[in-house]
Image (cartoon, rainbow, N blue to C red):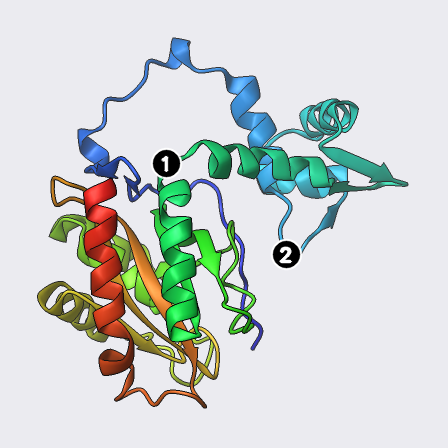
Amino acid sequence: MSKKITHSAGNPPLALSAAGIESASALPLPLKRDLIAGLEKGLQVIEAFDQERSRLTISEVAQRTGLTRAAARRYLITLTHLGYIRQQDKLFSLTPQVLRLGQSYLHSARLPRIAQPLLYRLAYSLQEAASVGVLDHDQLVCVAAVSAGRLVSATLQPGTRVPAFFTANGRVLLAALPQPQIEDFLERLQPEAITVHTIVNKERLLLEIARTREQGYAIVDQELELGLRTIAVPVRDFRGETVAAINISVHAARIAVEDIRESCLPALLKVQLELAALL
């Protein structure tokens, strides 16, 4: 089964970011009159394109966004005029200009800029791959990554999104959430077996998250990709709040699952302390 690496709009938020963890219910709700509906819908049109459907018709965009066909057409024409979308016959697709939106975050956000030099040192000292990720809704988003010359996985790239429940970084971040949010996450979760190792039983997932919280790290063995093993620890700021997760990814042929803790955890914990002092 091929894995879907993308993101979906409209999921209830798990608000965990470089600013720290906040309960979604604790965030102040904006007044409707303060929201710009056109901007919201325009971004929804951009988000309608993904790995599985990179080219869409007007009707397909309308169906995916909940817009009328007439409204979807106008948004597509506007985004094409601005250079974010191109049209070929009746099909529309995103242009590389959309990457400017992600680059604005990577260039301006403090976490990726601080983490990147430490990731280089971590990855090259172990000759493995390292990455930092944050939660966005129910997905893990990679915000910084270094491969140390070894291509371990195509998912270890800035901007890549994967379901949080079967990644080490994701479980570390889920373990940092209040218990009611974890239970809400599992209630709406529809886990899909990506490999034969993927844990899809919700009770077992809850135990894995609890174990991660207790021991302070997570190890995931080939649940996202066959041959990919990862170990992750939380990234905390000076207040002790979890703001991200950092991991080491190795190929199963190089390090056995029972050896990954001894091989990689000490270096991860050292970087964890350094990042806490900088955040």
Bin the neighbour count of mark 2 within 10 Å (Cα to Cα): few under 14, some 14-19, many 20 and up.
Answer: few
Residue 109 visible somewhere in the drawing: yes
Q: Which residue is disc 1 drawn over?
A: 110
User: Outermost residue, right direction?
Assistant: 89
Is 83 placed above or below 91 here? above
Q: Quadrant of residue 261?
A: bottom left
Residue at left 71%, top 31%? 69
Is 211 placed above or below 156 here? below
Three-letter amino acid code at disc 1? Arg
Residue at left 56%, top 27%? 41
Q: Quarter of the image for the N terminus: give it.
A: bottom right
Numbered mark located on residue 51 in the image: 2
Three-letter amino acid code at disc 2? Gln
Is 249 placed above or below 162 here? below
Numbered mark located on residue 231 in the image: none
Depth order, front residue of 63/124:
124
Q: How far apart are marks 1 and 2 (CA)?
A: 28 Å
In x, y percent, where is residue 84? 71, 32
- Compared across the picture, whether 97 is left or right of 47 comes to right
Residue at left 35%, top 41%? 111
Residue at left 14%, top 49%? 180
Bin the neighbour count of mark 1 within 10 Å (Cα to Cα): few under 14, some 14-19, many 20 and up.
Answer: some
In x, y percent, where is residue 86? 80, 36
Mark toward the start of the polypeptide (1 vs 2): 2
